[in-house]
Each structure stands twice: as structure tokens, then as C-alpha cells.
Image (tube, coloured by chain):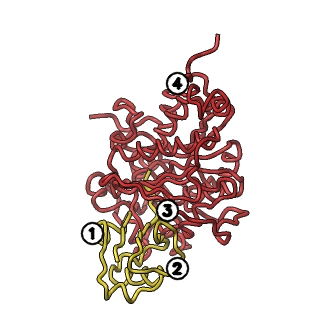
Chain colours: A yellow, B red
Amino acid sequence: MTILLFGITKDIVGQPTLSLSHSEAQGLHTAGELKEFLKDNYPDMKKLSSLAVAVNSEYAQDEHAIKEEDEIAIIPPVSGG
Amino acid sequence: MKSNRYIRQTQLREFGPLAQEKLQNASVLVVGLGGLGIPVLQYLNAMGIGRLGLVDNDIIDETNLHRQVLYNEAEIGQSKIEVCLARLKEQNSQTIIDVHETFLNRDNALGIIGNYDLVVDASDNFPTRYLINDACIIQNKPFVYGALHGFEGQVSVFNYKGGPTYRCLFPVMPAASELPSCDENGVLGVLPGIIGNLQALEVVKMIAGIGEVLSGRLLVYNGLNTTMHNIRFSKNPKHSNICILQESYQVPCSSDLEIDALKLQDLLQTDQPHLLIDVREPGEFMEDRLESAVNIPIGELEDRQIVFDNTDKVFLICQSGIRSMQGKYILQKRFPDVKFINVHGGLNRIRASEPLV
């Protein structure tokens, strides 16, 4: 599973994309579970109160199902101007 | 004789004289005269929008110049809104320009926004962005959102013909400590130019009724690898049914305790006991600070132990007065009995008043 990271999530992970192995991805069934997985592995993400997940370029609610071949993007709000 | 001023766009078949007339009859409010607001205004003014409203209360700082390309070196320390007004009048004498020399706040937002057809969110902080969202829903105005982080930008049109809003994407306003601003994180000079121009284009499309408005889609631009992602999203009535503004957005209200940065300077010289907390990041604090200031970065205000003995007044300062206002709300909640006062205009205002050496 490949996850595109935007905004501060890219800075937290330290790279623009995150590749999950087959075994890691197998345990993740929904967008909400993916968020929890990221928060567990990257504790700085716990601080973010709003974090949008897009599955195949569509905004996904927490219960939205995800599959290994989906294109997933993590989009936090950004404030700069 | 009819002017040829707009002929290069009216000769476009999809645009034509009718669209030009619509621009002429339109009014647009631009909140924020920084990296985003400047390109938005320069193009809307050049293209012939009839009436433009400007909202800002900041002054030009040296660190603005690399991205806020309307301002010149000689104008450091001057009011952004005054410089903008003069420049835009020179650019197009036919535009009616209203100046609102204030930051948008809970008290003035509905009144100001109500006077315009649509709004451009060119602000640089979450409290203002959420305030614009909520006020635009209440006033039934569409608004064009643009925001930056490093080499990235986001653009969307919210509340367009009953479409999705900012809170449909990001329901909860992030706390001040969650995410860095441009001042803390940095931004490449050209980035706001790109994002601001995309915002201006959405404004023109909406008014002229041409093309497809970026409603229900979030555009995420990455300048480093030149990619654009379009994320589709839909309306969430749970987050978009708003009838009144929230109690607080952590932006200054007229009723709030504030002191002008220049008056603070006088006060500090009188030896009155006081505590001055600078809420910027340690790097910024090291670069430039007031002598009596102690540094507690905004992210640490929730938990850091603070001793207030012998002080009846606690002043909060940052670069421009925005983060210190957010800090004031955090501390006021923690210590309801202490009097916290925000230093309006921040270090920028103090430094701008000093003679150049």
C-alpha cells in the first residue's frame, strides 16, 4: 500500500510517500484504521485534530473501506498565507 | 469613445463583453494582504472587478518582501493596507476600493462580509479561516480558500451554491500548537504567487459564470515535484449547518484586553512589575526579542509551569500579534484570575517604529 503524504504529515514521516508492506496493509480495513496505524507509528500525528484521508482521490470518512491497491493520500489542514 | 482596456479578454469567445460587465458589477472582499492576497488583488484589480474590499491590520516587515511582491524596501514599517490602496489605485483608477484597517474578528466579520458578493480567504491563520467559513455560511456567500505549507498549497471554493464548506473537509479548528505557520515553518517566495493566482481565477470564473468552479474539490499543489491532486469531497450537513458564530475564534475582538505595541514600550520603561511572555519559537526569540521577555513557545503554554508572583499584568507578545492572541486564550483558560494582555502589532510594530541604524 502506498500512501501520499501532504503538509505536516510529510514532515512528521520525513518523506513524501510511505509504503506499507503486504502484511502491514492486510491489517488495515478502513480509513479510520489507517489513521490509527499512523498515529501509533508516528506519535506526532496524534496532535493533529483534523486529518483528511483521500482514497482514490475521494475524501473518505473513517468507516470507508480501503484496499491494498488503492491510492491513498493523507491531507492535513495548512494555514500559511 | 469606448475603452480598449479589457479587449484582450473580452475578445475571448467564452468570456466576451457580458462577462466583463459582470466583473464590473461585482464586489469582492479579500481578507489578508500577504503572500496570497497580493496576487489576488493585483489580478482582480487589473481585470476590472468593480469594487474590492481590503482587510488587514499588519505592517510591512522585511521578512515579507520575498513573497509579498507588491511591497518595496522603502515601505518596511508602513501599513500594508495603505500601501496596497495606493498601488491598486495607480493600477486601475476605475476600481472602487474599500479599506477595512482591522483584523477580521467575531465582532466585525458578519458586517464586513455582508457587503460583498464573495470573499477570498487569503489569511495566514486557522482562527481567521474558520471565522471566514462560519461567517460566509451565515451570510450565504461563497468564498475562495487558499493556504500554504512549505512547498505545497491548497485551493478550493467553499459554500458555492450550497456546496461543501471548509468544515466538511476539516471539521475541527486545529489548536495553535498543532501546526506551524509560515513564520515558523517557512514558505518559498513564489508559492503564494501560484496559489493566489489560482484563487483569483476561481473568483473570475464564479463571477463571469464560465468554466467549472472548484467547488467540492480540494486542489493540492506540490511545487517541488509539480503535481496537482484533486480530491473530491461532499457536503456534510453536520458541519455546514451554522446559524451563529462561535463564542470565540481566538482572534482579537474589540472587547479584548489589548495594548498597542508602542505603548507597551513606554510602559516597560516605568519599572512597573510585569511579566512579558514571548510565545514565538526559540529560533525566532534568539534572533530578536525584547529585553525583559521570557520565551514560552505557544505549543508549551498548555503545560509549562508559570509563576506569576508580584505581577498583576501579564503581557503576551509574538511577531505580529496573532499567535500571542491565541496564546492569551490558552492561558486565560488555564489561569482565569490572571489578567493577560495581548501586545497588538507585536515586535513588527515596535521594530518598525525604531529609527534605522
Q: Residue at x 38, y 72 (%)?
A: B300
Q: Are marks 3 and 2 in contact (CB under 8 Å)?
A: no
Please give the chain letter of the residue carrying mark 1: A
- On screen, residue A6 versus residue B47, left or right, reads left
Residue topped by disc 4: B8
Query: Residue at label 1?
Result: A14
The CA span between labels 1 and 4 is: 46 Å
Which residue is rendered at x = 36% and y = 68% of the image? A4
Residue B292 in the image: above or below residue A52: above
Label 1 and label 3: CA atoms lie apart by 23 Å
**Structural distance between the alpha carbons of marks 3 and 4:** 33 Å
**Chain ID at mark 2:** A
Residue B260 locus on image (x, y percent): 50, 48
Q: Amino acid at mark 2?
A: His
Residue B196 in the image, given as x and y percentages of width and height = 46, 44
Mark positioned earlier in the residue sequence (2 or 1): 1
User: Within 10 Å of the Cα at label 3, are there few (<14), some (14-19), or many (20+) other Cα atoms?
Assistant: many
Instruction: Indicate the secondary structure of the residue bearing disc 3.
Output: strand
Q: Amino acid at mark 4?
A: Arg
Residue tagged by mark 2?
A: A64
Query: Disc 3 designates what residue?
Result: B231
Residue B101 visible within the image: no
| B174 sits left or right of B222 in the view | right
Disc 2 crowd, CA 10 A, few/some/many (<14, 14-19, 20+):
some
Chain letter of mark 3 equals B
- Whether label 2 touches label 4, CB < 8 Å: no
**Mark closer to the observer (1, 3):** 3
Q: Quadrant of residue B250?
A: bottom right
